[in-house]
Amino acid sequence: MKKWLHNTVIGCTAAALLLFLAGCGGGKESPAASSPPAAATGIQERTIKAGIGLNEDHPEGQGLKKFAELVSQKSGGKLKVQPYYAAQLGDDKKMTEALQAGLQEITIPSTSPLVGNIKEYAIFDFPFVFNEEKEAHAVLDGPLGQKLLEKLPEHNLIGLGYWENGFRNLTNSKHPVAKAEDFKGLKIRTMQNQVHLEAFQALGANPSPMAFSEVFSALESHTVDGQENPLATIKSNKYNEVQPYLSLTKHVYTPFVFLVGKKFWDQLSVEEQQILRDSAVEAGAYQRELNRTENQKALDDLKAAGMQVNEVSAEEKERMQEIIKPVIDKFAKEIGEDLVQEMYDEVAKARQ
Ligand code: TK8
């Protein structure tokens, strides 16, 4: 034991000393004396499992691919990110739990299914807060977004920033939705999130929360009439094949949060952590850009594929917002009204 400790101390650089004290020295996970734990210096050969819910051709898939390339470049090929697309490793919730348990290293879920654990993320589930991507980015990349990332470690997660899922639009198999009354009785799949559920209930719809990986077959079998997602997802997941109507509700903006399991993170050297952090930020900028162009292109492609598309007027959106208001007020109290106000203030600033 003594010899192992000695070797490890020598193996740790000054920069990594803190990490050593927190991680290597804990003793709980100390392997046998002959195989010291991963020293918190330099770059080791590692394979990193990264899973997402969307397909490889979706901007999130392309962003993950870019991330893997960057990590490989910056680590001289030592860190290998193995991407898994299309919920091969499970849906957002399952993969997040796998990170917490140390069974998977990275996932990039929508923030909405995290709200069960971290209630403050529900501010991004409030409908009709943002009009444009840049307003959401101002909140996400500013102090409020940072404050929310800092809530992750106590849940065994590390957040390296925000990518973009984007503005959600409604599709369904019954009729065009252009006014608040058109939601009446529609069976809509929602994300596993209480704000979404109650907001659609307030509009008179009949929502059912469901993991993303089950959506296509639920639409195909008419278990539900509709769903809502950004245009790039509607296209990539071919919902147009089972959903004739697309209504441009743009009712809510969903961020992706780049998550690393804390158990894994704590084994990394400072250098390795920096590589992952820098690559997540760089690939994130690329992903957001690509998302913008792909969402625009997807609209044309979905029209060309035969979807019947309708706009929703500003007046109707205001009516919807008015109907949903009691739900928002209730959740604002639960989350903390100061935090919610901080978001509105940031948005107002971004609009100037
Ligand atoms: C993909 C999900 C998806 C989300 C949903 O893992 O569940 O509808 O919009 O994109 O995060």
Image (cartoon, helix red, strand yellow):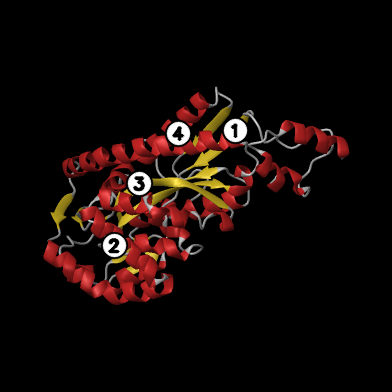
Q: Earlier in the sequence, mark 3 or mark 2?
A: 3
Badge 2 crowding class, 10 Å Cα cut-off, few under 14, some 14 to 19, many 20 or more, is few
Residue drawn at (52%, 40%), measured in percent from left and top? 50
Place of residue 59 in the rendered image (x, y in percent of width and height, measured from the top left):
34, 39
Q: From the viewer's perspective, is residue 113 above or below residue 37?
A: below
Q: Position of residue 69 (x, y in %)?
A: 46, 28
Label 1 to label 4, Cα distance in Å?
14 Å
Can you give x and y, in whole percent of width and height, for residue 98 in the image? 58, 50
Q: Of the residues shown, which amino acid type is indicated by label 2? A: Asp
| Residue marked by disc 1 | 47
Is disc 3 surrounded by few (<14), some (14 to 19) or many (20+) residues within 10 Å?
many
Q: Is mark 4 within 8 Å of ligand 1?
A: no
Q: Between marks 3 and 2, how big is the CA–CA gap?
A: 21 Å
Left or right of 18 on screen, residue 306: left
Q: Viewed as shown, does residue 309 lie left or right of 324?
A: left
Q: What number is the disc on residue 67?
A: 4
Numbered label attached to residue 345: 2
Q: Residue furthest top?
A: 76
